Image: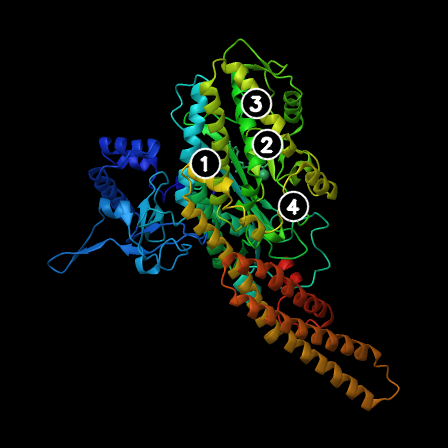
């Protein structure tokens, strides 16, 4: 593919997007559908029939034979079951058929998806419901219809339903605030997201020789290579040809699917790269990010490469995250996190800013939880990208303004809806380009916030559900107070000053990686939640239940179910890792070490027999070291087997997850040590699995 014209020609060709709808749907149908998409009006069955038929014709012209309700179960992956359009006729032929009902609702057999006890197996049926706010698209020969996935009693069993609910919650509350500022025109407030996706690429042949990469997505053994990322020569470095081919092909596929893939570059660690799209509404950004991950894995495979989305594939070099750039936008495209050009707009900006600062401080544990999984435990707080302590970076200018507000320098003006902060208008904040802001988990970058804790393999849904809901809650409280106030401006001044004063402890512009910050954060009373297991315990606290139920994002039952699923997911992940380590140590590493020891022993015997004068101290020394480390490895392997046996027996899920963290994971670390040391001693030709050097530098 060459040239700009080609890109514009292929972009969105596999998507049933707005322009296709306008072209293919009767005017009335199009209008009715648009109302549903933009304002959530219910869709009439007759309209659905017309849309379904047009969608089917379009899809068949594009070579589709099947359709699928595409959904996002609690596994964090996507799910699809393909049905063909064929319908038999009485004379033994088939026609291609697709009804409104088939478009709107599906009934996948849901019994094998995690439900956290919400759906007992005997009533396993769940249903999928068309999410018309995210456009349908074609992959291979199938029409994909984005759907929400619920139980028959209406509980969400997926990651999309609560996300849509949280978008509605923040829409409602943000609109209330805008109305109070005299904005009568805005009809909808949307959250926008641009997720930057980091990943590693390794050679497929090497990948296939490592059971840990195959089963766990990360290396469970591996001695550090002589060179890591210390030369800082990979970040933004020249892109290798094979990688470039990969990036080119993912761009092509993503563009066809309407994904606004924009930026590609090498990341900090060797073999690490990043892709960033242009932002879109949260719902679509989330669907698209799922597609991005899927396309990456498939294209890599096609090119004899393997794409690693795990948060920490390699010890000793950076892991991968997903920067979740987040903002609020009106249906007219006004970014509410842009300071604006008038004092009025500035005041409104300060109101939203104060709400966000308060939300992040008050609900920091929930944000932390939204980025928690077993993989991310290796990153957060491990002296690379962000610490486990949630803080907000505002940049110099904005921090200055916040300090002024805290010092009581905010004045109410006579002009309605305008506050005076001593300057005429706020500056348009230029992005802070200093390095230090990279250490902040939640950074203001000019006209959006960047939540940097999310793990590279995670769905971004969880983080955005929490963000949307906690900000909705603060906006609700602000609107509640302002609606009762006689003196709008005086009240607003009081609220903003109070929020800033009460929550400024979360604002921190310094080095988030430093030990001083850990101490300082503790003095400020900021939580430092180090592990997934700890983070998950905040989900069902009364304040969290109150928050999510008030805004209709989760019912209490859904919270309990999700918490259970996440504990279980953690436990299962560590269990798989432990079993994989056992398998590799027992069948690959220890036997290889024994072979090598035998070779050393043979050499000693042979040389000794040949000449009593020969110096065999090297072999002898090595033999002693190798056999003693091999014995250690075996002992640690036995230790791991032992704790694993005990842990598997635990029934209660939270307790089980905690045991996997405290006991099993600890035993895994113990087993890794002698094995990695052995890798440094055993001759390369005996070592049974590709090394870090192979994986990181031989792509
Ligand atoms: P970087 O953070 O790497 O310096 P940018 O700031 O240019 O790069 O953009 C990072 C991501 O933020 C991109 O995906 C971009 O589309 C997204 N972004 C920009 N503006 C917004 C916004 N208003 N809302 C959400 N995401 C945004
Ligand atoms: Mg960024």
Question: What residue would you read off at disc 3?
Answer: 496
Query: Do we see residue 278 in this rendering?
Result: no
Q: Position of residue 373 (x, y in %)?
A: 55, 52
Q: Position of residue 203 (x, y in %)?
A: 57, 60
Q: Residue furthest left?
A: 91
- Tag on residue 13? none
Task: Specify which label sits upstream in the sequence, 3 or 1.
Answer: 1
* Residue 561 against residue 34 in the figure, above or below: below
| Dot 2 beta carbon under 8 Å from ligand 1 | yes
Crowd tier of the residue under label 1, counting other residues whose Cα lies within 10 Å: few below 14, some 14–19, many 20 or above: some
Q: For the residue labelled by badge 3, is the local secondary structure a helix, a strand or a loop?
A: helix
Q: For the residue labelled by badge 4, is the local secondary structure a helix, a strand or a loop?
A: loop
Question: What residue would you read off at disc 1?
Answer: 280
Task: Specify which label sits upstream in the sequence, 4 or 2.
Answer: 4
Task: Specify which label sits upstream in the sequence, 1 or 4.
Answer: 4
Q: Nearer the viewer, mark 4 or mark 3?
A: 3
Query: Do we see residue 694 in this rendering?
Result: yes
Crowd tier of the residue under label 4, counting other residues whose Cα lies within 10 Å: few below 14, some 14–19, many 20 or above: some
């Amino acid at each position: 593919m060459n040239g700009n014209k080609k890109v514009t020609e292929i972009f969105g060709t596999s998507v049933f997007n707005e322009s296709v709808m306008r072209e293919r749907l009767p005017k009335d149908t199009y209008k009715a559908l648009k109302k549903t998409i933009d304002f959530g009006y219910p869709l009439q069955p007759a309209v659905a029939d017309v849309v379904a038929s047009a969608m089917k014709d379009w899809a068949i012209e594009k070579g589709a034979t099947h359709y699928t309700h595409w959904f996002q179960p609690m596994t964090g992956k996507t799910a699809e079951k393909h049905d063909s359009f064929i319908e038999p006729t009485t004379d033994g032929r088939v026609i291609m058929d697709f009804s409104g009902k088939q478009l709107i609702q599906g009934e996948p057999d849901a019994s094998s998806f995690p439900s956290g006890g919400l759906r007992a197996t005997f009533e396993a049926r769940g249903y999928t419901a068309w999410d018309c706010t995210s456009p349908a698209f074609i992959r291979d020969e199938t029409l994909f219809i984005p759907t929400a996935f619920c139980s028959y009693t209406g509980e969400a069993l997926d990651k999309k339903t609560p996300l849509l609910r949280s978008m509605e919650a923040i829409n409602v509350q943000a609109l209330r605030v805008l109305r109070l500022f005299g904005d009568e025109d805005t009809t909808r407030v949307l959250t926008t997201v641009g997720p930057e996706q980091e990943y590693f690429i390794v050679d497929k042949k090497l990948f296939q020789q490592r059971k840990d990469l195959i089963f766990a997505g990360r290396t469970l053994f591996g001695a550090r290579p002589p060179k890591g990322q210390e030369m800082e020569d990979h970040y933004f470095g020249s892109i290798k040809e094979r990688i470039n081919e990969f990036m080119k092909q993912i761009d092509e596929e993503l563009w066809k699917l309407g994904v606004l893939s924009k930026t590609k570059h090498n990341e900090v660690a060797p073999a690490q790269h990043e892709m960033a799209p242009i932002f879109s509404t949260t719902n679509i950004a989330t669907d698209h990010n799922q597609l991005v991950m899927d396309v990456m894995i498939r294209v890599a495979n096609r090119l004899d490469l393997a794409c690693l989305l795990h948060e920490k594939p390699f010890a000793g070099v950076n892991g991968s995250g997903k920067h979740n750039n987040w903002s609020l936008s009106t249906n007219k495209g006004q970014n509410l996190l842009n300071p604006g050009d008038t004092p009025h707009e500035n005041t409104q900006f300060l109101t939203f800013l104060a709400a966000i600062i308060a939300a992040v401080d008050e609900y920091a544990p929930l944000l932390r939880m939204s980025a928690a999984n077993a993989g991310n435990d290796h990153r957060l707080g491990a002296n690379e990208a962000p610490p486990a302590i949630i803080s907000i970076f505002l940049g110099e200018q904005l921090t200055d303004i916040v300090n002024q507000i805290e010092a009581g320098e905010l004045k109410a003006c006579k002009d309605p809806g305008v506050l005076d902060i001593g300057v005429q208008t706020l500056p348009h904040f230029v992005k802070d380009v200093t390095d230090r802001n990279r250490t902040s988990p939640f950074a203001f970058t000019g006209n959006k916030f960047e939540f940097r804790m999310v793990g590279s393999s995670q769905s971004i849904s969880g983080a955005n559900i929490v963000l949307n809901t906690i900000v909705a809650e603060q906006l609700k409280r602000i609107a509640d107070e302002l609606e009762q106030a006689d003196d709008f401006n005086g009240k607003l001044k009081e609220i903003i000053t109070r929020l800033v004063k009460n929550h400024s402890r979360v604002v921190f512009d310094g080095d988030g990686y430093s030990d001083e910050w850990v101490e300082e954060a503790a003095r400020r009373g900021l939580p430092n939640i180090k592990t997934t297991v700890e983070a998950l315990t905040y989900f069902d606290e009364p304040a969290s239940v109150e928050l999510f139920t008030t805004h209709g994002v989760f019912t209490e039952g859904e919270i309990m179910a999700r918490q259970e699923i996440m504990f279980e997911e953690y436990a299962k992940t560590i269990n798989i890792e432990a079993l994989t380590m056992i398998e590799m140590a027992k069948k690959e590493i220890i036997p290889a070490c024994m072979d090598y020891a035998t070779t050393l022993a043979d050499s000693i015997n042979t040389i000794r027999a040949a000449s009593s004068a020969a110096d065999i101290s090297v072999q002898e020394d090595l033999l002693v070291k190798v056999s003693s480390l091999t014995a250690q490895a075996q002992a640690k392997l036995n230790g791991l087997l032992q704790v694993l046996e005990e842990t598997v027996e635990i029934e209660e899920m939270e307790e089980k997850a905690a045991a996997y963290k405290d006991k099993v994971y600890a035993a895994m670390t113990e087993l890794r040590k002698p094995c990695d040391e052995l890798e440094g001693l055993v001759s390369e030709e005996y070592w049974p699995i590709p090394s870090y050097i192979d994986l990181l530098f031989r792509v």
